Amino acid sequence: MPHYKLPDPLVCMNGQRVSDLATWRDVRRPEILSAFARNVYGRTPAIKTNLRFEPLTPDADVFDGLATRRQVRIRLLDDQNAPWIDLLLFIPKQAGNRLPVFLGLNYGNQGVHPDPGIVPSRNSICQRGEHAHRWPLELILKRGYVVASFHGGDIELDRHGSGCRFTPESWRNGIRFRVLAESGRARFDDDDWGSIGAWAWGLSRALDYLQTDPAIDGRRVAVFGHSRTGKTALWAGAQDERFALVISNDSGQGGAAIARRRYGETVAASYALSGIWYCRNYARYANNEDQLPVDAHMLIALIAPRPVYVASAELDRWADPRGEFLAALHAEPVYALYGLKGLGVSDMPGVNNPVGHTIGYHVRTGDHEITPYDWEQYLDFADRHIR
């Protein structure tokens, strides 16, 4: 493990120490947000949207009357052929109105559950119910939460491991290439947004819809994700302060793990595998992490004062569980500025021993996955913060 020094989230670029909320909100937070945009994820462009919400299918009772399945097409731009989002929702029927929500990306709507009434995501090749083990719908619904999800490929196709039907032509039909073409440019600038930025933008557009649905309380939406979608959830939550709670499951470097540790998923390894996730500037920090002006603890700090949960898996060395814990720990000073308690511990907890207050953390047994145990912790945390 190399020796490293973390940048201080409470020291401005001009050397001024942050001692009050006004300086954090007006000076330091915008500095950090801009540094992540310019060096890691890319700048999210201002896009002129024309949002329309179209029912994809009639609402249907599912799970023996426990919930309503709703499917909504979110038109994003004037052009009907532009990328759109097919949002899949499960709404508990006996929990009242104005319900809290878990919103996250999937690898194809049809993979969430074998329900034959789910309209398959157009750019997904996953089988019905293929990822149902990651979505314990009845568990979540019985706790009184809506589940909302869509395929990241609706917005931007991924190269590998995400269930995308990837071709160069279909990739160029994503939101990033459309925005690039409309700008009159032929190539992306070094600080233009990558796929994570595009997916995060899509999560905010799904939130736009959720804030219009009378069954949902748009002020109580938790954005969550696993692995690459965990990186996305953190960046979405950092940028869009309408998200009430943010959850990262095994997101690793580029998400909740300290990059300077160079453990598991290093910047070099992540960029070589999936450079399209990030802006081109991020390649400068491969094997050069000490020059990165930010790190994961500052990404978590951007979410303050809202609650955030970081989860790891004991055998998931790629995602660096200790690096994820340390990022959560070193975000605490910003939460303290708000008078809030973060983790409340200084030592990494044992396996299956969740800790935390406004910042939550656990490391469970097992490997790189999202499990019912993880969901139980997220539900308990959400009960404390957004019920």
Image: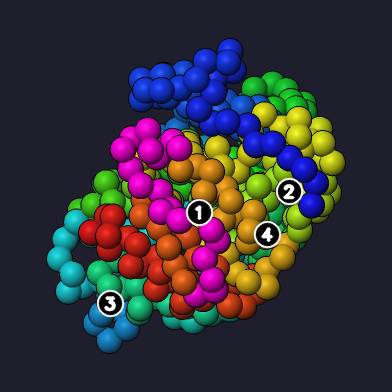
Residue wearing tag 1: 346
Residue wearing tag 4: 320
Marks 2 and 1, how far apart at CA: 18 Å
Whether 302 is drawn above or below 344: the answer is above
User: What is the chief secondary structure element of the magenta stretch?
Assistant: loop
Between 66 and 337, which is closer to the camera in this rendering?
337
Residue 284 appears in which quarter of the rendering?
Answer: top right
Residue 71 appears in which quarter of the rendering?
Answer: bottom left
- The nearer-to-camera label among 4 and 1 is 1
Give the numbered dot on residue 142: 3
Between 344 and 290, which is closer to the camera in this rendering?
344
Measuring 33% from the left and 67% from the top, which residue is drawn there?
A: 380
**Which amino acid, mark 1?**
Ser
Measuring 46% from the left and 18% from the top, which residue is drawn there?
A: 27
Q: Choose the circle earlier in sequence order: 3 or 1.
A: 3
Q: Secondary structure at mark 3?
A: helix
Q: Tell me where residue 29 appears, x and y as whole percent.
A: 48, 27
Magenta stretch bounds: 333-352
Q: Are marks 2 and 4 in contact (CB under 8 Å)?
A: yes
Q: Residue furthest left?
A: 96
Q: Quadrant of the C terminus?
A: bottom left
Marks 3 and 1, how far apart at CA: 34 Å
Q: Is residue 348 magenta?
A: yes
Marks 4 and 3, how far apart at CA: 33 Å
| Circle 4 crowding by C-alpha within 10 Å: few under 14, some 14–19, many from 20 | many
Marks 2 and 3, how far apart at CA: 40 Å
Q: Secondary structure at mark 4?
A: loop
Residue wearing tag 2: 261
Left or right of 40 in this view: 245: left
Q: Secondary structure at mark 1?
A: loop
